[in-house]
Image (cartoon, helix red, strand yellow):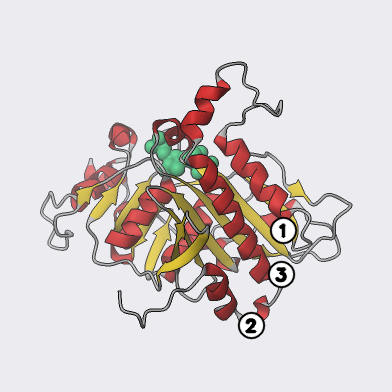
Amino acid sequence: MRFTEKIITIERFIFEHQPDYARGDFTNLLYDIAMAAKMIANKTTRAGLADILGTSGATNVQGETQQRLDIYADQTIFRLVDHTGRVCVMASEEHEDVLEIPPEFNKGRYVLVYDPLDGSSNIDVNVSIGTVFGIYRCVDWANRGRVEDCLQPGRKLLAAGYVLYGASTMLVYSTGQGVHGFTLDPHIGEFLLSHPDMRFPEPKYYSANHAYFGRWSPEIQEYTRWLQGRGDYEDAPKALSERYIGSLVADFHRNLLRGGVFMYPAEVGKPEGKIRVLYEAGPLAFLAHQAGGYASDGQQNILDIVPQTLHDRTPIFIGNRHLVQKAEEFVAQGDTAFQ
Ligand code: AHG
Ligand code: MN
Ligand code: MN
């Protein structure tokens, strides 16, 4: 560390790098999300203890029912944003329908979509989890927010990001001017700029749940062989290793820092895949694009998918551009080529 290196808080960074259209509400909405991240991070470090307390009658000293972390995260984001006059509507993984702004509050210009707690299966085993968010402009000013405001393709995102609750808490976001990462200093409660201008380096890893290998189509199976450097492919990537956490945010984050591809492809009998378009695939595809990478459903850019419902799913290949494009090549050849 040199004394000339600046210490930059997320507040200062957002303020200094806000797009021209984004004075005021948009910038403050990003602060709100950073605040939600701090509150959720504070709980993730205590989740194990909270679970123990929750077993004895499941009420705490204030008489409140102990909540699962994903419900807490969902409610925290909503409660920080609903009354601010900055959004017209929200959508969350945890709710079937859109989250309307209560009538007593003003509506704003933006739409917030989010996966409050990503990687739920990892909560109880002390493995990294995350939050994903995307911000759109409200399309219909005449009405209070509606589902139509949420059903926009990733290409229309104004901003997207994620929070990773790992050994340290990080917030990574983009407003379309590169991807920037901040690490929470828990002692002072501030996110400080730690990873400016993140770009996918040469790939080291691929990430997939290989337990599903038998359910993948022959072309996806062949793609994994290509990733592993097997078969007679001159363009095979060099010595990729496999890493899979099972929290999309954590898997994406590692691949962004180390280079690689994450895939959750279609399965035989489950062509829609698992990852949700609106609040998982879309925001991460926006970040991947901003970091020099690419995200595809195997046939098209994820950013071009217009979700038909809030919880539409999509197959996904996301990471270094050439690795994702290769997945598209395999898919385009069709399964008969590899029988
Ligand atoms: P969520 O916890 O928000 O429902 O998302 C879970 C997703 C994603 O985070 C992860 O990549 C994937 O589920 C893991 O699924 P498998 O256990 O089938 O591999
Ligand atoms: Mn998720
Ligand atoms: Mn979730």
Three-letter code for the amino acid on which mark 1 is drawn = Asp
Question: Is the residue 173 above or below the residue 279 in the image?
Answer: below
How packed is label 1: few (under 14 Cα within 10 Å), some, or many (20 or more)?
A: many
Q: Residue at x 83, y 49 (%)?
A: 102
Image mark for residue 149: 1
Left or right: 112 with respect to 184?
Answer: right
| Mark 3 or 2, closer to the camera | 3
Visible residue check, residue 271: no
**Residue at the disc numbered 2:** 20
Image mark for residue 25: 3
Question: Is the residue 13 above or below the residue 220 in the image?
Answer: below
The C terminus, quarter of image? top left
Q: Going from the N terminus, do you reach mark 3 or mark 1 first?
A: 3
Image mark for residue 241: none
- Measuring from the top left, give residue 100's x and y in whole percent: 78, 49
Q: Residue at x 40, y 72 (%)?
A: 196
Mark 1 to mark 2: distance in Å? 22 Å
Callout 3–callout 2 Cβ contact below 8 Å = no
How packed is label 3: few (under 14 Cα within 10 Å), some, or many (20 or more)?
A: some
Q: What kind of element bears circle 3? A: helix
Mark 2 beta carbon near ligand 2 (under 8 Å): no
Q: Nearer the viewer, residue 184 or 248?
A: 184
Mark 3 to mark 2: distance in Å? 12 Å
Q: Residue at x 71, y 74 (%)?
A: 24
Residue 155: image quadrant is bottom right
- Measuring from the top left, give residue 301's x and y in whole percent: 46, 62
Three-letter code for the amino acid on which mark 2 is drawn = Asp
Left or right: 103 with respect to 332?
Answer: right
Three-letter code for the amino acid on which mark 3 is drawn = Asp
